[in-house]
Image (cartoon, rainbow, N blue to C red):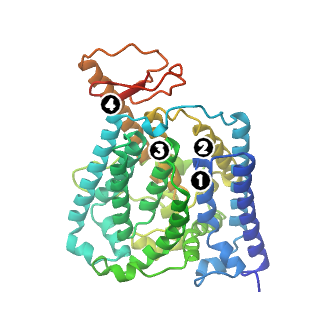
Amino acid sequence: MLFRGGASNSTTALAAAGMWCVSLALSQKSLRLDPLSPAMIYLYLLGLFHLGLVVPWALGVETSQPPLWLITNDLNPALAMVIVATTSYYAGVALAVWLWPPAPARNAVPHVRCYNNMLCWMGLAIVTLGLLAFGAGVQALGLERLLRSDYTETYTLASQYDPRFFATSMTFVPLGLYLAAASARRGILPWVLGCGALWGACILFLGFRGYALVPAITIFAVLHKRGVRLPRLAYLVGLPLLLVIIPLVRAVRAERLADRGITTTLTIQAPLLALEEMGGSLRALVHTIQFLDTEPLRWGQTYWQALRSAVPNVAFRWQGGEYLPVEQLPPSHWMTLQAAPDAYRAHGGLGFSAVAEPYMNFGAPGVAAYFFLLALLLVAAYRFDVSRPTRLAMWGVVLGPLLWTVRNDFHGFFRPVLLGLASIVAARLLANSWTTTRTRTVPDLEPSVQHGPGAVASPSEAGGLTAATTRVQGTGIASST
């Protein structure tokens, strides 16, 4: 039999997949969006995380035993919401392209030459703080105890003991890498990428896939916006390798940390298994729709709670959160407690869904409005002047947490965004303060050439003259004349 799970579920799954594919094709071919723009990257992830499991299962080509929730629940309401989300998202993209047509390319300085030393050092300082916090987290858990634990036990330990150090490292290191990737000089950039690759490899070895892959995608998007281009061979090798790594990490993290070795690492995994694992976000949407049959909508309460949770816990001694009724729990906790109580008691979780949270707050109209506005904003935000590293850094520190919400709720969004924006402002203030305290004569520049802290202007903005760099002492500010 070609289809599985009943004609209704399989037909709806294939319809959702078809709508997603049509949206991708039209966005790139008809609307001519950059295939690696944030709007396209978000659409890729939206489909993979919500359809990666159900479509192979519906076609009967799955590579593993389907989970119980997939074959015992009615998937049609959830898949219908995926169709609403995808359709609304494409409508927002189309309107944004119509309102703001792509600007013609100008003969400008390669954007990778635009740098901001102060912002780069700020990013590297944040990375260093994150690494120190990671070391403190390992010490708090106990290295010997950590080595005896598998992934689930590690997650439980990090939640039972003081989790602030681990959580801080998972926020600070990616955040610092975003700032450095957006502002580093060409000579420093390989070191930034090396640091990011080493961090990602360590986090993957611990079993935390999302904390490695989302920052990697964000850094890649930032570098692409700066003008860094990879050879086609890198994509032909990298994408299949990624499809092998995702299920491989799941196999590795089932063992104790001390027992993980090269033998397990070299085990070949089916690439299709990666898509099936990513597609588990549909479960959160299925359960959310079911549970809301007997519960009221939240009407924005989850977003307000996420904003309030942005205030960090800075107490000298760790204290757990206060008791909350079930209906006031963060969406991922609320869903996990009811759908998988054993996992919840073990401090685990099932993640969440970018489609489920607007539905949880405002129902189906909320899903349509959210994805329409999100697409509109992502396309519009991509048109900023990339020759200003501070703007590119702001774009990066928002994009990373936003991509995280594709398979999680908004409780992981506001804190890193606010911290990242505050770091950018601090770097700008430090650059301005340093400039005013150091006196050195700077050649006269046209007002349109001097963009402020951290920018290089293009030759076209400087009247078409040959680019020459003039730097203000101590600030790392460069301008073309």
Mark earlier in primary sequence (3, 4): 3
Q: CA distance from mark 4 to mark 1?
A: 33 Å
Q: Position of residue 310 (x, y in %)?
A: 41, 46
| Distance from the alpha carbon under mark 1 to that under mark 3 | 14 Å
Q: Which residue is mark 3?
A: 396
| Helix, strand or loop status at disc 2 | helix
Tag 4, which secondary structure? loop
Kindly identify which residue carries mark 4.
476
Q: Nearer the viewer, residue 263 or 325?
A: 263
Q: Real-space Cα distance between discs 4 and 2? A: 30 Å
* Residue 181 percent across, percent down from the top left: 40, 45
Count of numbered tags: 4
What kind of element bears circle 1? Answer: helix
Residue drawn at 74 percent across, 74 percent down: 9
Q: Is residue 293 left or right of residue 213?
A: right
Q: Amino acid at mark 4?
A: Gly
